[in-house]
C-alpha cells in the first residue's frame, strides 16, 4: 500500500485538487456568500497562474519534497514517532496532527516576521476571497514552506502515509476554507469545532490588521482557540468587511507579473498594523 502511494503521490494529489476545485467552483456559482468586486477571469488567471508556477518550481528545485524525507526517516527509524512503540494508524494520526500544528505556527510566523511577510502578503492582496485564493501563494513562500515541512517530517518522524494524507488535506481544506460559499449558520457553528470553515477563515482576509492577524489555522481550528488567535466574526460582518491589504487596493496593479516581483519592492507594507 505504501509503495502504491509513493508511486502515485502526484496523481493522487492532482485528482483531489481537480475534484475539490470543481466542486467548490460549482458551489460558489450556485450559492455565493459575497458578491465579487473584481473580474473573476482576471483573478483566476492570476491565482491559477501562481499555483502552476509554484508546482513546476517546487518539483524542479525540491524533487524529493516532504514525502522523500518521510521515506528516508521511516526507513531508518528517525524521528519522534519512529522511536515510540505506536500502532501504524496511531502514528499516522499523530503525524497528521503534528504537521498541522507546524503549519499553524508557520502561518503565524509568516505574519510576524517582516522577511517572511514580504512573500506571504501576496496571498493577502487578493481583493476577493474564493476557492482560488487558497492556492494564491508566491513561489518563494511555497519553497520556504516546503523546507519547513521537510524539517518537521524529519523531527516528527511522520509516516509516508501521514505525509501524503496531510498534503492532500492541506490542499483540499485550503480551497474549502477560502470558498466564497454560503453555509447555514448552525452547520458552520458545528463544523468550526472540527475544521476551519470559510466563515472562520474569511476573517483572516480582512483589511483590518487585528482581524487578518487571527485565525491562522488551515485544517484544524483547535490551535487558534488554544493559543488565543481565534476570532469568531469580523467587526463589519461578512457582507460589510473589506478584503485585502490597505496599501494594495488597485486590482490593475495586482497582475501575475507584478505579484511575482511585489516582495522585492521597497515598500511591501506590514503584517502588524
Image (spheres, grey):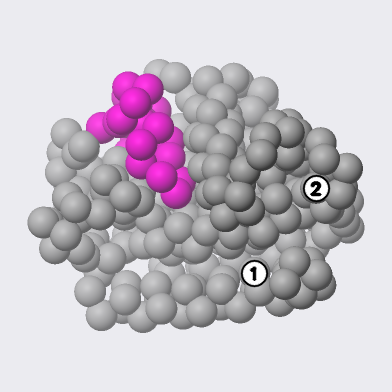
Residue displayed at 70% across by 50% down: 159
- The magenta stretch is 206-231
Residue displayed at 59% across by 59% down: 165
Expressed as whole percent of the image width and height from the top left, the position of residue 83 reads: 73, 33
Q: Is residue 177 visible?
A: yes
Task: Say whether disc 1 or disc 2 marks the residue closer to the N-terminus.
Answer: 1
- Of tags 1 and 2, the one toward the viewer is 2
Q: Which residue matches tag 2?
A: 74
Q: Which residue matches tag 1?
A: 13
Question: Separation of disc 1 and disc 2 at Cα?
Answer: 21 Å
The picture quadrant where one finds residue 76 is top right
Q: Residues within 10 Å of mark 2 (few under 14, many from 20)?
A: some
Closest to the observer, 104 or 250: 104
Q: Is residue 208 magenta?
A: yes
Residue 147 position (above or below residue 71): above
Expressed as whole percent of the image width and height from the top left, the position of residue 12 reads: 66, 74
Q: Residues within 10 Å of mark 1 (few under 14, many from 20)?
A: some
What secondary structure is found at the residue carrying circle 2? Answer: helix
Expressed as whole percent of the image width and height from the top left, the position of residue 244 reads: 40, 42
Residue 154 position (above or below residue 19): above
Closest to the observer, 245 or 78: 78
Could you tell me what secondary structure mostly forms the magenta stretch?
A: loop
Q: Which numbered dot is residue 25?
A: none
- Toward the left, the furthest residue is 186
| Quadrant placement of the C terminus | top left
Q: Is residue 153 magenta?
A: no
- In the figure, is residue 46 to the left or right of 41? right
What secondary structure is found at the residue carrying circle 1? Answer: helix
- Toward the front, the furthest residue is 85
The picture quadrant where one finds residue 32 is bottom left
- In the figure, is residue 31 to the left or right of 202? left
Amino acid at each position: 500500500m505504501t509503495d502504491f502511494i509513493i508511486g502515485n503521490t502526484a496523481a493522487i494529489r492532482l485528482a483531489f485538487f481537480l475534484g475539490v476545485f470543481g466542486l467548490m467552483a460549482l458551489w460558489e456559482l450556485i450559492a455565493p456568500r459575497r458578491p465579487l468586486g473584481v473580474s473573476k477571469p482576471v483573478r483566476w488567471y492570476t491565482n491559477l497562474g501562481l499555483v502552476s508556477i509554484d508546482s513546476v518550481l517546487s518539483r524542479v528545485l525540491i524533487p524529493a519534497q516532504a514525502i522523500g524525507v518521510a521515506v528516508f526517516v521511516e526507513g531508518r527509524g528517525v524521528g519522534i514517532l519512529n522511536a515510540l512503540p505506536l500502532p501504524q494508524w496511531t502514528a499516522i494520526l499523530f503525524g497528521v496532527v503534528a504537521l498541522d500544528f507546524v503549519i499553524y505556527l508557520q502561518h503565524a510566523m509568516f505574519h510576524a516576521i517582516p522577511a517572511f511577510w514580504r512573500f506571504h502578503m501576496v496571498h493577502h492582496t487578493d481583493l476577493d476571497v474564493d476557492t482560488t485564493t487558497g492556492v494564491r501563494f508566491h513561489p518563494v513562500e511555497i519553497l520556504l514552506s516546503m523546507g519547513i515541512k521537510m524539517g518537521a517530517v524529519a523531527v516528527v518522524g511522520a509516516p509516508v502515509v501521514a505525509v501524503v494524507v496531510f498534503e492532500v488535506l492541506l490542499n483540499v481544506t485550503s480551497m474549502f476554507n477560502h470558498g466564497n460559499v454560503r453555509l447555514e449558520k448552525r452547520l458552520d457553528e458545528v463544523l468550526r469545532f472540527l475544521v476551519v470553515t470559510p466563515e472562520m477563515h474569511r476573517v483572516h482576509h480582512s483589511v483590518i490588521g487585528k482581524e487578518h492577524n487571527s485565525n491562522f489555522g488551515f485544517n484544524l481550528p483547535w490551535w487558534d482557540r488554544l493559543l488565543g488567535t481565534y476570532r469568531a466574526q469580523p467587526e463589519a460582518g461578512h457582507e460589510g468587511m473589506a478584503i485585502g491589504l490597505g496599501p494594495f487596493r488597485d486590482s490593475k496593479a495586482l497582475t501575475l507579473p507584478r505579484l511575482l516581483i511585489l516582495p522585492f519592492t521597497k515598500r511591501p507594507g506590514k503584517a502588524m498594523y
